[in-house]
Amino acid sequence: MQALARYMMRGRVQAIGSIVSLALLSLLVSPLAIFTTAGVALVTLVHGYREGLKSLIVATVVLTVFTGVALNQTAIGMELALKFWLPAWFLASIVITKSSMSLAIVVAATLSCLLVLGFYFFTDPAAHWYEVISKQLLPMLKEAGMEIQEGPEAEKLWQFMSKIMTGSALALFLALQTISLLLARWWQALLYNPGGFAQEFRQLRFGMVAASIALVTTIFAITTVNEMVLNLFFIMIVLMMFQGLAVIHHLVAKCKLSPSLLIGVYVIMLFTLQHGAVGLLFIALIGLLDNGLNLRFRLCTKVQDELN
């Protein structure tokens, strides 16, 4: 990781080459999109938003030309730049101008919520996703040899999925952009400020305004059957999850708890994703409550008293 970051920081050519190469690899292995996005953020964090924008534009041109010649699909470069690189540059620019990673993540969540509202005010997202599932996804899965359930129960499942796909997709977008920004900030700290990232991440806090909106959204999502609110709820969960993780990292560091606790938290989150994401919801609840109750201080004090 550090070697990759150091190579990207050798010069503009190396940075653009790394960003484009990782983008091409992400077409084969989609999780690598995090690294190419983090590359854009790293260039911006280190060299400023002007240099970051220049690198983004050149990388977009190079990727567009390459995919146009090699794959006859020039849209891939533009699509990747608009979906991943441009938001990463924008969020990194907020970090360097406002000196606040928390603000950048809140802005990313706000933009995600605005996109949800825009889709519901101007389109019918559920109808769009149902068409995608029924006419594109299911036939593709059948061609791949997968057994697809049919009947009334399966139909209810596809309809439910179509109703939550907008919020799920944008929550995933928020998670990807946040992880990419955190990764870029970690790379920057490895190169120029060892240990700085851990301290900055443990101080992550989104504030009472974001927490209040998350709380109201959660209450409405639970007590009503409003489809739009449910999709907004997914974004609020992801936002508060990152603060919850920051709280846990803070407790482990300040209360001198075993680092294995962190491993356990991430394992639980991973293995409960297919079972209602209970672990993720619990971490998000910790983040939500921390804004008003300052759990970092209260829990750490309680733990230290018990140890003494």
Image (spheres, rainbow, N blue to C red):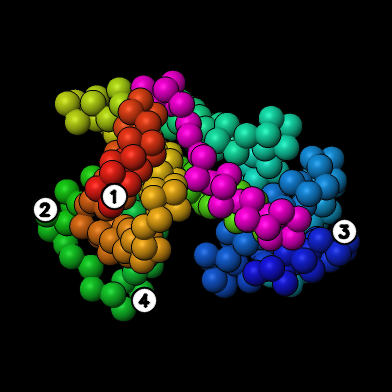
Other residues around mark 4 within 10 Å, as few (<14) / some (14–19) / many (≥20): few
Instruction: Please name which of the two marks, 3 or 1, marks the residue nearer to the observer.
Output: 1
Based on the picture, tell me whether residue 199 belongs to the magenta stretch: yes
Tell me what residue is drawn at x 32 percent, y 46 percent.
Answer: 304
Other residues around mark 3 within 10 Å, as few (<14) / some (14–19) / many (≥20): some
Q: Which residues are magenta?
A: 188-212
Rounded to the nearest angstrom, the CA distance separating label 1 from label 4 is 60 Å
Query: Which is nearer the N-term, disc 1 or disc 4?
Result: 4
Name the residue type under label 3: Arg
The residue beneath circle 4 is 144
Residue 308 is tagged as 1
Rounded to the nearest angstrom, the CA distance separating label 3 from label 1 is 54 Å
Name the residue type under label 1: Asn
Where on the picture, by quarter, is residue 162? top left
Query: Which is nearer the N-term, disc 3 or disc 1?
Result: 3
Q: Position of residue 107 (x, y in %)?
A: 56, 31
Query: Which is nearer the N-term, disc 2 or disc 1?
Result: 2
The residue beneath circle 2 is 152
